[in-house]
Image (cartoon, rainbow, N blue to C red):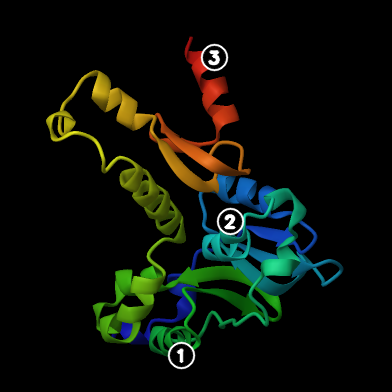
Amino acid sequence: METEIPLREIMVRRVVKGDGELSVREAAGLMKKYDVDSVVVVRRGGGEGGEPVGIVTHGDIINGVVSKDTKPSSVKLKEIMTTPLITASPNDRLSEVAKKMAEERIGKIPVLEDGKLVGIVADVDILSVSSEMNSILADLIEMHVSEREVLRAETLRTGREGGEDREEGEEGEEGEEGEEGEEERMGQGICEKCGSFSSSLELKDGVMVCETCSEEMERVEG
């Protein structure tokens, strides 16, 4: 049965790690560089690669930094990480891990073997190979559907609310109005280009950027 598959067969082996002293801004840069939505926090001197002690996801950054209007460069990972770290073994069965994730209300679980971090598994990874897990993980998936998309959706919502007062005649028109909408001011969040927090993000060329990065992009285009 699919639910009996050991975790080692579906886990992602490349895990992005960071020291607890790393700033949230630096961590956001790592997430962007490696196209991931979490960083496993390790303790210095904890053996090869460091001892895993916590995890920071986009959701933690949103709740612990962005929502409080705090400067990302002034906050360390150890201050917002989820700890104690809940982990699994490479030999654990999918059904066991799915139940553990549902009980603990977590969307990702690092995989340790002999105390060493060897991989990481997300709820969506389990669902991709086992449809039988739907009943166990359905609610959890709804909570953790890409924390990156949660941030994007929130800023898009802010932008839409700001544009609700437009005249009906402008709705659906193309040309200059469409271009203006693409660069519309979207609200607060983390700039996808430089990784810093901004209270006035703009959607430009398909990415959310701060005013400084937007101006730089315009200079390059010009």
The answer to whether marks 1 and 2 mark residues whose Cβ atoms lie closer than 8 Å is no
Name the residue type under label 3. Answer: Arg
What is the spatial separation of the Cα atoms under label 2 and label 3, in whole angstroms?
28 Å
Q: Looking at the image, which residue is at 33% across and 72% down?
A: 142
| 65 left or right, relative to 106 | right
Q: Residues within 10 Å of mark 2 (few under 14, many from 20)?
A: many
Which label sits in the foreground, 1 or 3? 3
Q: Looking at the image, which residue is at 71% across and 73% down?
A: 52
- In percent of width and height, residue 129 lies at 31, 72
Name the residue type under label 1. Answer: Glu
- In percent of width and height, residue 134 lies at 27, 80
Question: Of marks 2 and 3, which one's residue comes earlier in the chain?
Answer: 2
Which label sits in the foreground, 2 or 3? 2
- In percent of width and height, residue 15 lies at 60, 61
| 110 left or right, relative to 179 | right
Q: Which mark is residue 20?
A: none
Q: Which mark is residue 103?
A: 1
What is the spatial separation of the Cα atoms under label 1 and label 3, in whole angstroms?
50 Å
Q: Is residue 177 above or below residue 171?
A: above
Question: Of marks 1 and 2, which one's residue comes earlier in the chain?
Answer: 2
Residue at the top extreme of this rendering = 222
Residue position for label 2: 66
Question: Of marks 1 and 3, which one's residue comes earlier in the chain?
Answer: 1
> In the rendered image, is residue 217 in sight?
yes
Name the residue type under label 2. Answer: Val
Q: Give the SS element for disc 3.
A: helix
Residue position for label 3: 219
Q: Residues within 10 Å of mark 1 (few under 14, many from 20)?
A: few
The answer to whether marks 2 and 3 mark residues whose Cβ atoms lie closer than 8 Å is no
Which quadrant of the figure contains the N terminus? bottom left
